[in-house]
Image (tube, grey):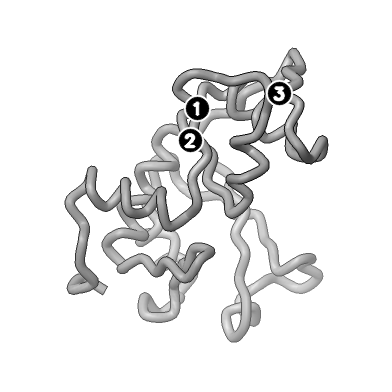
Amino acid sequence: MKIKLKLFAMLSERLPAGAEDHTMELEVPDGATTHQIVRLLGIPPELATLTLLDGVHLTQRERDQLLDDWLNVCEWVPVFFLWRPNLPDEGDNHLIELAVAGMAGTIVTENVRDLRGGELRFPGLVAETPAEFMARWRGTHGHDDDSAS
């Protein structure tokens, strides 16, 4: 499968010449885990981090679990219609449209106030901050400590 990978700071030296926006495309085996990709690139595991907005930091175990779970359910979804939820910021309407088309249950954003303010409601679709999402995810998966970082 083909993935896009962004590398910043000292890891950007591992990007191929001419890479734009700190991004490279990489072909990896189907079902490859984040751990395997990090090893494939020769990145020391302690340098491979993912920090979500709002200061919510994930342990290495949580990062691997979250990204592996996410990659296992991702699929390309064409959007053939436009829902107009009439959000306070017209520029946010596409987020609801994409979530509905992709049958998502959650939109993770710092902008929950605007996303929760639409006239058209979709049962089963919620907007959560990264902190709210991680609290719920940790509760569901039983990860509530940083001991595995």
- Precedes in sequence: disc 1 or disc 3: 3
Query: Mark 3 highlights which residue?
Result: 85
Secondary structure of residue under mark 3: loop
The three-letter amino acid code for the residue at tag 3 is Pro
Q: Residue at x 62, y 45 (%)?
A: 113
Q: Is residue 66 left or right of residue 145?
A: right
Kindly identify which residue carries mark 1: 125
View extreme (bottom): residue: 10
> Helix, strand or loop at disc 1?
loop
* Distance between mark 1 and mark 2 Cα atoms: 6 Å
Residue 85 percent coordinates (x, y): 71, 23
Q: N-terminal of the two: label 2 or label 3?
A: 3
Query: Image quarter for residue 35?
Result: bottom left
Q: Nearer the viewer, residue 27 or 43?
A: 43
Relative to 24, is 72 above or below? Answer: above
| Residue contact between numbered discs 1 and 2, judged by CB atoms under 8 Å | yes
What residue do we see at 58% from left, 45% from top? 112
Location of mark 2 (residue): 106
Q: Amino acid at mark 1?
A: Leu
Give the CA separation, mark 1 to mark 3: 12 Å
Q: Position of residue 90 (x, y in %)?
A: 82, 35
Relative image position of residue 22 (x, y in whole percent): 70, 69
Amino acid at dot 2: Thr
